[in-house]
Image (cartoon, rainbow, N blue to C red):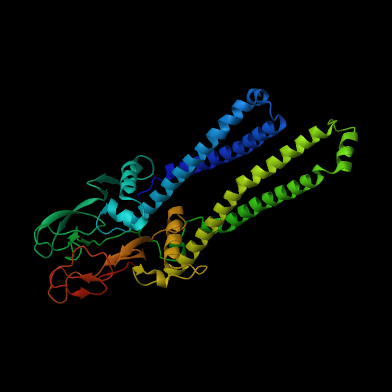
Amino acid sequence: MYLRKGRITFFKIKNILLAVIAIANLIVSISMEVFLVVRYWGDSYTIMHAKATPEFIFWIIAGPLMLIYVAWSSGNIGDATFYSGYFEGDLDGFVSAEELAEVTGRSVKKVRRQLKYFPKFYMKNYKFEKDRAELASKTITCDCLSCGGVFEKKLFFTGECPYCGSSDLQARVLTDGKFYSISNELKGQPKTYSYYTANNLETKKILFPILLGLSLFVILICILTGIDTLSKYNDHDYLVSIILDPNDHRYDFDNIHYDMIYSLLADFFIIAGLIPVAVKRLKKIGYVKIADLMAAFLARVKTPFVGAEKIPAYKKADYAKKINLIFRSLKKGYLKNCTIEKHSGELQVALAKKIVKDRCPNCGGPIVGAADADYICRYCDSKIMDVVVKKD
C-alpha cells in the first residue's frame, strides 16, 4: 500500500547491474594497473602514459563510488520496505519520526530526512508534516452512537469523537449501515505461512544456496590456479618447456614470469571481489531462514504481539540478535504482514491487530488510543487486559 513497487523493482535491477559492472571493471583495472607497475617498475613515464592507464584509473575511482551508491540505494529500499510494513501496522494514521527512530535505532535526523524524500522515489500514500508521517486513507462520514454526533474519520484507523471524546471505533461507529474497524491487511487473505512470506521465498530458498555455491566454486578454482602458478614460478624445467614450445611465442623467462604475475593478480582480485559477495549471500540465506521460521511460527500465534523470548531459537541467537535478524528480514521483504514495535520498553513483533474493548470495566471511561495488548485507563488507572487482539 505504501511502496512504489514498480520503481523499487527498477531500482533493484539497476543496483544489480551497477554492482556487476563496478566489480568487474575494478577487478580488471586494479589487476592490470598493478601488473603495469610490476612490469615497468621504475619507468613511471611508461606506466602513466600507457594507452589503457586513463581507463584503469577512471574505473579505480568510479568503481568504489558506484558501489557506495549501490549500498546507499539498497539501504534506502530496505528502510522504505520496513517503514511500509510499520505504516500498515499503525492504528492511528500518524507515525512520528521519533517513533521510527526508536524502533530502527537510527537517528531522528536521518529518519526525518528519509521520510521527506522517500515519497519521491520509494513510497506513496503519506505526507510528512509536523515531524510525522500522515497516512492516507479514505475519509468517511460517521455517526457516534455514544452521543449522536456526526463527524468524519479516516477509514482503517482509530479516532475520537470530537464531541464526547469517545473513540469512534470503541463507540461502534457505523456509516452506510456498516460497522468499521481498523484494518491493516488485505481482505480475503488467510493468515497461513504464505501470508507472512514474500511470494518468491521458496525460489530464494533454492536459488541463494546455488549462487553461494557458484561463488565458492569460482573462489576455489582461483585458489587452485594461483597455487599451481606459484608452484611453477621457479620451476626451471617448466619454464624451459614453455620457451621450447613452438606454439608459444614467449622467448625469455621474464615474459613468462610477467604473465604468471598477471595471472596471480587476476586470481587475487577475483577472490577479493567474490568473498564479500559470498558473505552477503550467506547473510541473505540467514534472513530467508529467519523469514521461513517466523512465518511458520506466526501462523500459529494467537496474540497480536510476540516477545523475543517466545520467538523460535535460531543458531543460539540472543534477544538483540533475534530482533536484528527479523528486522533485516523485514527490510529485505522476505517477511511481511508483521513489523517490529516497541511496547513496555521492549521491541516486539507485532501482527495484524484490532481493538475489541471499548470501555473500562471499572469506571466506564472510553478506551482511546490503545496500541498494546493491555491498556491503562486514563481515568481510573486500571489495567485492562486484552484490549488489542490479533485480527482474524
Q: In the rendered image, is residue 57 in sight?
A: yes
Q: What is the total number of numbered labels drawn onto the structure image? A: 0
The image quadrant that residue 6 belongs to is: top left
Instruction: Residue at 37% x, 60% y: name it.
Output: 339
Residue 180 picture location, percent across and down: 23, 61
182 lies above or below 316: above
The answer to which of 195 and 278 lies nearer the viewer is: 278
Residue 162 placement, left or right of 197: left
Residue 77 picture location, percent across and down: 42, 47
Q: In the rendered image, is residue 350 in sight?
A: no
Instruction: Residue at 19% x, 69% y: name it.
Output: 358
Instruction: Residue at 61% x, 30% y: name it.
Output: 56
Q: In the image as oriented, which residue stretches furthest toward the front? A: 42
Q: In the image as oriented, which residue stretches furthest toward the bottom? A: 362
Instruction: Residue at 80% x, 47% y: name it.
Output: 231
Residue 84 picture location, percent across and down: 36, 52
246 lies above or below 20: above
The image quadrant that residue 337 belongs to is: bottom left
196 lies above or below 243: below
